[in-house]
């Protein structure tokens, strides 16, 4: 599932293509992918310009000149393609937003969605999200004091969107590996030095992934069960925390 770095990459790629452009046509092929009736959905888009694109946690927010906002979550398997009709991907599309000759195709939105919000109602949707880990105001001190209030296993806390925005299954494992800390640890047992290492790794891994435009082939532990650890050569292990698969190196992480 795309997490913060992948969505940041989409934002960077899409912004120059659609910002300032007027929506000329909208097709809805899957009503379940939107949250209001198709006609008002189309009606509030056609003729409007995209003013800017913002990423919040794992969402992309398409801001319209009217102040209304489209909120995209790709969930598992969702993706976007931008191009002309003749470049149309050979897959079922759920939503298509045309800007003249060029079209933004939404594909694989089975669990994912593109929802319409007004300026007033958006707060209900994203107001619950925790801080953005790469924003300037998010400091090691803030992270440490947030952690001090938590109890329980590290991994579920890192992927809780109300705690920190944008980290999911993959990056939580990558961050723990980079920090040399097992994702199965209880956070109340983490010392000050471990917490500051975790904060540093969180920033390092997310920045690094954004610089690659996403991480998939670069993962050091995630989805690499039985493959050799890139640091010590021992086999990467997989465990389950709740229903979440968790990957780690027993030798490099404590
Ligand atoms: Zn190792």
Image (cartoon, rainbow, N blue to C red):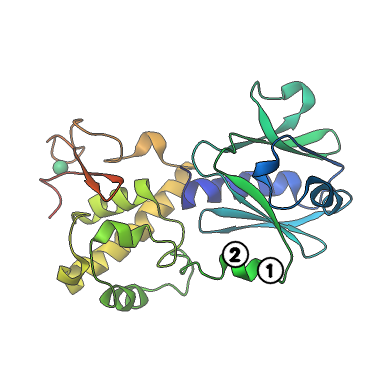
In screen coordinates, is 151 left or right of 102?
A: left
Q: Of the numbered discs in the image, which one, if any, rests on residue 203?
A: none
Q: Where is residue 19 in the image (x, y as percent from the top left)?
A: 75, 51
Helix, strand or loop under label 1: loop
Q: Residue at x 71, y 47 (%)?
A: 16
The correct choice, above or below, for 187 with respect to 172 in the image is below
Q: Position of residue 105 (x, y in %)?
A: 69, 35
- Labels 1 and 2 touching (C-beta < 8 A): yes
Q: Quadrant of ligand 1?
A: top left
Label 1 to label 2: alpha-carbon separation: 7 Å
Q: Residue at x 18, y 64 (%)?
A: 186
Q: Residues within 10 Å of mark 1 (few under 14, many from 20)?
A: few
Dividing the image into 4 quarters, which one contains the C terminus?
bottom left
Q: Residues within 10 Å of mark 2 (few under 14, many from 20)?
A: few
**Closer to the camera in the image, 54 or 243:** 243
Q: Which residue is drawn at 66% across and 48% down?
A: 114
Q: Mark 2 points at which residue?
A: 125
Q: Name the residue under label 1.
A: 121
């Amino acid at each position: 599932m795309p997490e913060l770095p992948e969505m940041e990459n989409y934002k960077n790629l899409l912004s120059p293509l659609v910002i300032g452009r007027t929506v000329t046509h909208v097709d809805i092929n899957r009503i379940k992918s939107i949250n209001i009736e198709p006609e008002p959905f189309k009606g509030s888009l056609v003729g409007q310009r995209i003013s800017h694109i913002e990423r919040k946690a794992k969402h992309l927010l398409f801001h319209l000149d009217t102040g209304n906002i489209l909120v995209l979550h790709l969930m598992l398997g969702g993706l976007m393609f931008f191009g002309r009709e003749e470049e149309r991907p050979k897959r079922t599309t759920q939503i298509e937003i045309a800007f003249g000759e060029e079209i933004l195709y939404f594909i694989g939105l089975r669990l994912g969605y593109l929802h319409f919000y007004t300026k007033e109602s958006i707060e209900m949707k994203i107001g619950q999200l925790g801080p953005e880990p790469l924003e300037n105001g998010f400091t090691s001190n803030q992270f440490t004091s947030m952690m001090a209030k938590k109890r329980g296993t590290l991994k579920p806390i890192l992927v809780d969107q109300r705690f920190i925005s944008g980290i999911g299954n993959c990056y939580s494992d990558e961050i723990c590996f980079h920090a040399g800390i097992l994702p199965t640890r209880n956070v109340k047992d983490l010392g000050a030095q471990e917490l500051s290492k975790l904060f540093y790794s969180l920033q390092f891994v997310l920045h690094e992934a954004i610089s690659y435009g996403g991480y998939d082939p670069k993962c050091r532990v995630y989805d690499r069960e039985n493959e050799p650890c890139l640091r010590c050569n021992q086999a990467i292990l997989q465990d389950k925390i709740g229903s979440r698969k968790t990957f780690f190196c027993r030798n490099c992480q404590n």
